[in-house]
Image: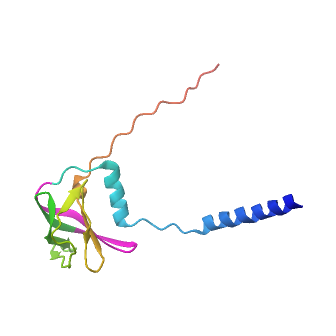
Amino acid sequence: MKKAITLFACIILFGTLYAQQNNEEEIPATCYQKYASVFEKRGAFPVENGTHDDVIITFRKGSSADCFLGKVTVKEGSIDITDIYIKFEDNTYEKVEKKYKYVDEKINIVNGISKTIVCYDDELINVMFTKKIKPKKKNYARAKEPEFDL
């Protein structure tokens, strides 16, 4: 009798766990997460000083993220936070006007992605230099499985 009750309880427990796993919705990755994954896998070349008009600027708040084309100026290997622009569809630019926390800190660029810039409204901004992503590595050629008659 005890075995039957234990077996019945296990079936209910595992059935419930299985049902919960199938009902969980997968949260889709944000544009920031997708870009960051590519930078992490491939790496990036160093970013030179100057104005770069081929960057991705990400704005994140909570679990949402928006990615826009833009341009920034790099001075001494750091982002100049007073010189960040978002690109319009007609190829004009608008300056990003935000109140930043930690204004005195350098916004360094590591592996093609800037250090996170924190705003007073808790918005997080990163600049990604997509033209600096290293090329995809070549795959090794796999040998065929042996097909010998023994």
Examine the structure image and report whether residue 25 is included in the region drawn in magenta.
no
Residue 148 figure quarter: top right
Q: Residue at x 72, y 64 (%)?
A: 13
Q: Which residue is nearer to you in this view: 68 or 61? A: 61
Q: Is residue 108 left or right of residue 1?
A: left
Q: Residue at x 22, y 59 (%)?
A: 129
Q: Residue furthest front?
A: 2
Seen in the picture, residue 6 relative to 118 is either above or below; the reply is above
Extent of the magenta region: 48-69
* Magenta stretch: helix, strand or loop mostly: strand
Q: Residue furthest top?
A: 150
Q: How many marks?
A: 0
Q: Is residue 122 left or right of residue 15?
A: left
Image quarter in which the N terminus is found: bottom right
Percent of width and height locating residue 87? 20, 72
Percent of width and height locating residue 8? 81, 63
Residue 100 figure quarter: bottom left
Examine the structure image and report whether residue 63 is included in the region drawn in magenta.
yes
Q: Is residue 91 visible?
A: no
Q: Residue at x 20, y 79 (%)?
A: 99
Percent of width and height locating residue 19? 66, 66
Residue 77 figure quarter: bottom left
Q: Which residue is nearer to you in this view: 147 or 79? A: 79
Seen in the picture, residue 4 relative to 44 is either above or below; the reply is below
Image quarter in which the C terminus is found: top right
Seen in the picture, residue 54 relative to 135 is either above or below; the reply is below
Percent of width and height locating residue 33? 37, 62
Q: Is residue 134 left or right of residue 30?
A: left
